[in-house]
Amino acid sequence: MTTLSEHPRVEYSYSYQDTPTGGDTDSLVIKLRCPGISSFKWCLKLYSLVLGGLGLLLSFIWVIFHLYVLSQTSLQELRQQRFLDIFLGLLLLLAMLSLLYGSYSQSSLFIIVFLASSLAVVIAYWCWYFYTKYAGGDYPVFEEEVGEIGCILTLLYTILILPIMLLYRSMEMLHTANTAQDEGRVRGKRKSPPAYEEGLAYPSL
């Protein structure tokens, strides 16, 4: 009887890389990656809540103040201005309520309502300003001061609204991701119907 003895098999592998002489073989690679919008979404939400709360308070004070001024005003031109101020204050109050609820409940619809209504306030203010300046005759208002204040407020509005737009963008991205995930789950649950055989196979005797 012959016995076969198996010897361990040893394999060697060599690799050679030609490096230029005098070169710096040590290298440091630094990769920078900007964080996504979702990573600081809570900061945007907090900013929106604070801005909505402060805007709501200031809008309410604005409306109450102009109601008081309206009750003390007898000149017709100034009363028209006060009516416009009250209307814009109520519209801004609605915008801040929408921002407050939209940022709290993560509702993109109310964020859209805020953007539309606040932009309508800015447009209505400038329309009234140009009307009184060029087509409305001489109104006893300080047109230059009103124009300067309008420019400052418009610039401030543009700066303050940028984080709100980032929050709306993050909401839309989250909604798109959730929709795609739900569609994937629905497709995964759908299975093809079982294939039925034409005849039954009986075992042969």
Image (spheres, rainbow, N blue to C red):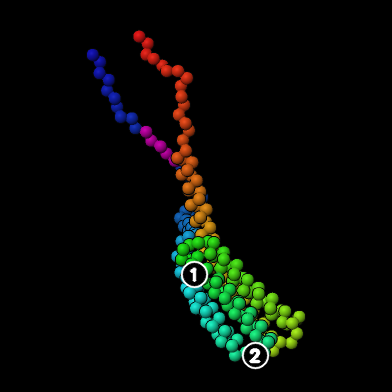
| Viewer-closest of 118 and 170 | 118
Task: Look at the image and say whether residue 66 sits in the magenta stretch.
Answer: no
| Viewer-closest of 155 and 7 | 155
Residue lying at the far top of the rendered structure: 205
Query: Magenta part of the protein: which range?
Result: 11-15
Taking 154 as reference, is 38 left or right?
Answer: left
Q: Which secondary structure class fits the magenta region best?
A: loop
| Viewer-closest of 44 and 197 | 197
- x%, y% of residue 140? 69, 89
Which one is closest to the eye, mark 1 or mark 2? 2
- x%, y% of residue 146? 65, 84
Label 1 to label 2: alpha-carbon separation: 37 Å
Q: Amino acid at mark 1?
A: Leu
User: At numbered mark 1, what does the secondary structure look like: helix, strand or loop?
Assistant: helix
- Which residue is found at the position 45% from the left and 55% from the top? 26
User: At numbered mark 2, what does the secondary structure look like: helix, strand or loop?
Assistant: loop
Q: Which mark is residue 32?
A: none
Residue lying at the far left of the rendered structure: 1
Q: Amino acid at mark 2?
A: Ser
In the picture, residue 126 is in which quadrant? bottom right
Q: Which mark is residue 100?
A: 1
What residue does disc 2 label?
A: 74
